[in-house]
Image: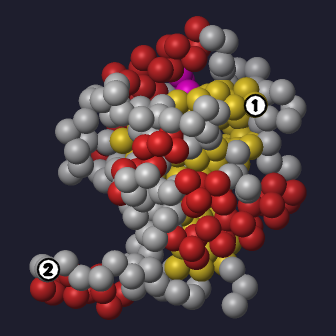
Amino acid sequence: MKILFVGDIVGKPGRAAVRHFVPVLRERFSLDLCIGNSENSAGGAGITGESADELLESLDLLTSGNHTWAKREIGGYLERPGVRQLRPANYPGDAPGRGDAVIEARSGARLGVINLEGRVFMKPLEDPFRTAERLVAQMHADGVRCILVDMHCEATSEKNAMGHFLDGRVSAVLGSHTHIQTADERVLRGGTAFITDVGMCGPWDSVIGLRKESAIERFLTQRPSSFDIAQGDVRLQGAIVEIDEATGRGRSIVRVQEKMPE
């Protein structure tokens, strides 16, 4: 099984990159499933039903993170039957939506997906490690061998720790949130594919997707400034993971970066 996971999709430019490249990559690499993190898909912060539905024309499932709730209307969307938009599983139990899903490829192979949010430099949520352990055990009990985890957090150490914690129990632990693609992709000793951060889909000539001038002003003045998405030089970043369907072990992981034509 070959899975594409693309990083944080930033606003309209990021959505355009997904729409343009995902069909191309599906064919080029004979991909079975394509997943992306949508938490910045609406105006650069948050998700709307419209932004999620647009992405789901190209992707099979969406994950998210700490910006999930930036748009108030997302709560109702997450409660819709059969919705293919996850929120982090370690939010309190009465939060709308769910944090895990099992999706099926055209071949009939099943993939479990778990969405987690870290706690270092972030919200004091429920323990993502214990949450992961519980959900992985449930999936294994249901006969799901192939499992992908989106570990959405700030600290590289927390992402690395989750990779080693789940090594041998899941197929892949892929980091998101920082919008900066790291160069440490590898298959861990137990057979879990890992990368600290898959990067972002959005404007490259920017500060993590934002207009440079706005971001610099925030650092210089320590005051809020306009939240403007940059334009131009749009790229799609992510990783392709190949999984042995019989064992659930990750076989390989390759970084992906594609540049939109000018």
- Position of 99 with respect to 261 (left or right) is left
Task: Name the residue furthest left.
Answer: 222
* Residue that badge 1 annotates: 104
Going 19% across and 78% down the picture, which residue do you hit?
224
Which segment did they paint magenta?
168-172
Estimate the x, y position of residue 236 in percent, counting from the top left.
62, 68
Tell me: residue 69, above or below residue 189.
below
Q: Quadrant of the C terminus?
A: bottom right
Going 64% across and 27% down the picture, which residue do you hit?
102
Residues at marks 2 and 1, CA–CA distance in whole angstroms: 46 Å
* Residue that badge 2 annotates: 223
Residue type, numbered disc 1:
Glu
Estimate the x, y position of residue 14 in percent, counting from the top left.
58, 70
Mark 1 crowd level (few <14, some 14–19, many ≥20, 10 Å Cα): few
Quadrant hosting residue 60 = top right
Residue 258 visible in rendering: yes
Estimate the x, y position of residue 96 in percent, counting from the top left.
42, 35
Estimate the x, y position of residue 98 in percent, counting from the top left.
48, 31
Tell me: residue 243, above or below residue 201.
above
* Magenta portion: prevailing SS class: loop
